[in-house]
Amino acid sequence: MTIPFDLDGSVAVITGAGSGIGRAAAISFARRGARLAVSDLDAARANETAALALDAGADAIAVTVDVASAADFERLRDRTLDEFDRVDVVMNNVGVLAMGAPESLPIEAWQRTLDLNLISVARSNLVFMPLLLAQGRGHIINTASASGLLAYGYDRLPYVASKHALVGVSEALALYLGPHGI
């Protein structure tokens, strides 16, 4: 069962908000009344998204974040709390793709893809989940992909693996967090 959530007045943190799904979500959340902490590895893109959110009527800040860094997540949390006093929604949206023939894809491509697409969510959970649990409410959104449900691309195995894992993690978290109001 999906519980309706009114974003008006809420505080949403979005990673990977400099373009694509993250930017579109930020603008949509802004139009629905959310206050936003938008982050991206590219400071200029994060600032542009924050400006678009401001144009849509929201309070918004931009924070440069490398999701491979626990310290950057902590800085994102602290900036959000300093600006807005709370966090209601965390959207883990970063996604990278490594492509190539399975027999020649370097291990570094696997490691980078899994680190950014999957392990970054674990970093985010360590930083933001205690806040949500303490307040007894909130939402965590993990952007996966159709590749998380259907392995249609043999030439993008690290991406498929990361998104399959992210779907599983999200489903397991829903079982754990649902009784806690999250």
Image (cartoon, grey):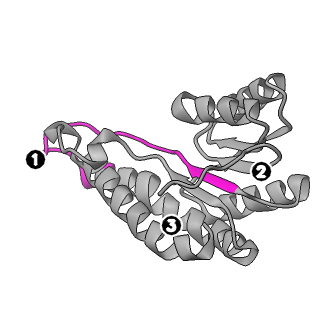
2 and 3 marks in contact (CB < 8 Å): no
The residue lying at 75 percent from left, 24 percent from top is: 52
| Residue extending farthest left | 103
Dot 3: element:
helix
The residue that label 3 is drawn on is 122
**In the figure, 99 relative to 83: above or below?**
above
Q: Tell me what residue is drawn at x 30 percent, y 40 percent.
A: 146
Q: Bounds of the magenta span?
A: 89-109
Left or right: 17 as drawn, with respect to 118: right
**Could you tell me residue 113's position as x and y percent?**
37, 50
Q: CA distance from mark 2 to mark 1?
A: 44 Å
For the residue marked with disc 3, what is the amino acid?
Ala
Which label sits in the foreground, 2 or 3? 2
Mark 3 neighbour class, 10 Å CA radius: few under 14, some 14 to 19, many 20 or more: some
Report whether 116 appears left or right of 26: left
* 100 shown above or below 173: above
Mark 2 neighbour density, 10 Å: few (under 14) some (14–19) many (20 or more): many
Question: Does 56 appear in magenta?
Answer: no
On the image, numbered disc 2 is attached to which residue? Answer: 11
Q: What is the magenta segment's predominant secondary structure?
A: loop
Q: Position of residue 3 (x, y in %)?
A: 58, 55
**Secondary structure type for disc 1:** loop
173 horizontally vs 7: left or right: left
What x and y, as percent, mark residue 79?
A: 82, 55
Give the labeled residue for mark 1.
Answer: 103
Residue 23: where, in percent of width, then height? 62, 31
